């Protein structure tokens, strides 16, 4: 949990009985709407999984629900191998990847490094679920930047590779994520 940003701990699976998703505002309506309306439903339907960093809102009592400082959503996806920006030779069937479907930081916590922490946490998570001894592997992580501002944020990290013909779609090979662990 973060209080201000003084205390940090792990991202945890979204549980709407404990956190108030409706107060989350990252400044981008589609990213807010997903958390407000769909994240919990999609988890219940096994479509995607959302992880949040809770924080104690100013003036809240211990019985109040916590706020969401940041969140990310992961899902499974498969892509045609010819679209994936890699030098590796891939078989002709669909290639499994992890989709970083959503990522947002509450406006009051932006500009303090939490976006970077959230991104790295999401990538490390994708790596761990893809490489643990019982895992079904994925070739990498893919994301679609929502707009140019989001693209600039992602491109401030040096590990993303653009998809040709789709500059807002970015890829990180699973092997590159090892360096972030
Ligand atoms: C994009 C977002 C996650 C960034 O979060 P943040 O907490 O402000 O980012 P950080 O403080 O961790 O910044 C990390 C790095 O990214 C850079 N950065 C952040 N926002 C940026 C932007 N809009 N353009 C370019 N670089 C940006 C920072 O300068 C910083 O680089 P530095 O370490 O070299 O200084 C946040 O603004 C947000 O939630 N936006 C709305 C939702 C959104 O667009 N999500 C992406 C969906 S695809």
Image (spheres, rainbow, N blue to C red):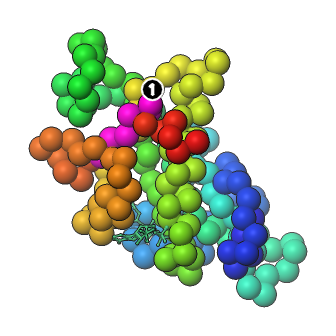
Residue 7 lies, in percent from the top left, at 75, 70
Residue 43 lies, in percent from the top left, at 58, 43
Depicted 141 relative to depicted 134: above or below: below
Q: Image quadrant of residue 102? A: bottom left
Q: In the rendered structure, which segment of residues is drawn in magenta?
A: 170-175
**Ligand 1 is in which quadrant of the figure?**
bottom left
Query: Which residue corresponds to mark 1?
Result: 138
Q: Residue at x 33, y 22 (%)?
A: 95
User: Magenta-highlighted stretch: main secondary structure?
Assistant: strand
Q: Image quadrant of residue 142? A: top left
Residue 44 lies, in percent from the top left, at 61, 41
SS at badge 1 = loop
- In depth, the one of 20 and 114 nearer the eye is 114
Depicted 163 relative to depicted 111: above or below: above
Q: Residue at x 43, y 76 (%)?
A: 27
Q: Is residue 60 left or right of residue 173?
A: right
Q: Is residue 177 left or right of residue 78?
A: right
Check the image and name the residue furthest to the right: 62
Q: Residue at x 49, y 54 (%)?
A: 119
């Amino acid at each position: 949990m973060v209080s201000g940003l003084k205390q940090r701990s792990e991202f945890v699976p979204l549980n709407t009985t404990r956190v108030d998703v409706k107060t989350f505002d990252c400044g981008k309506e589609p990213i807010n709407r997903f958390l407000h309306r769909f994240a919990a439903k999609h988890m219940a339907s096994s479509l995607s999984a959302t992880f949040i960093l809770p924080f104690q809102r100013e003036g809240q009592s211990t019985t109040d629900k916590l706020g969401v400082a940041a969140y990310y959503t992961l899902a499974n996806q498969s892509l045609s191998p010819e679209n994936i920006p890699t030098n590796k030779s891939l078989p002709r069937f669909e290639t499994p990847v992890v989709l970083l479907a959503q990522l947002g930081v509450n406006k009051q916590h932006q500009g303090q490094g939490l976006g970077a922490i959230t991104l790295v946490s999401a990538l490390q998570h994708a790596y761990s679920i893809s490489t643990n001894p019982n895992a079904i592997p994925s070739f990498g992580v893919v994301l679609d930047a929502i707009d140019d501002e989001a693209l600039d944020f992602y491109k401030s990290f040096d590990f993303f590779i653009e998809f040709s013909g789709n500059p807002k779609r970015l890829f990180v090979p699973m092997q590159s994520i090892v360096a972030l662990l």
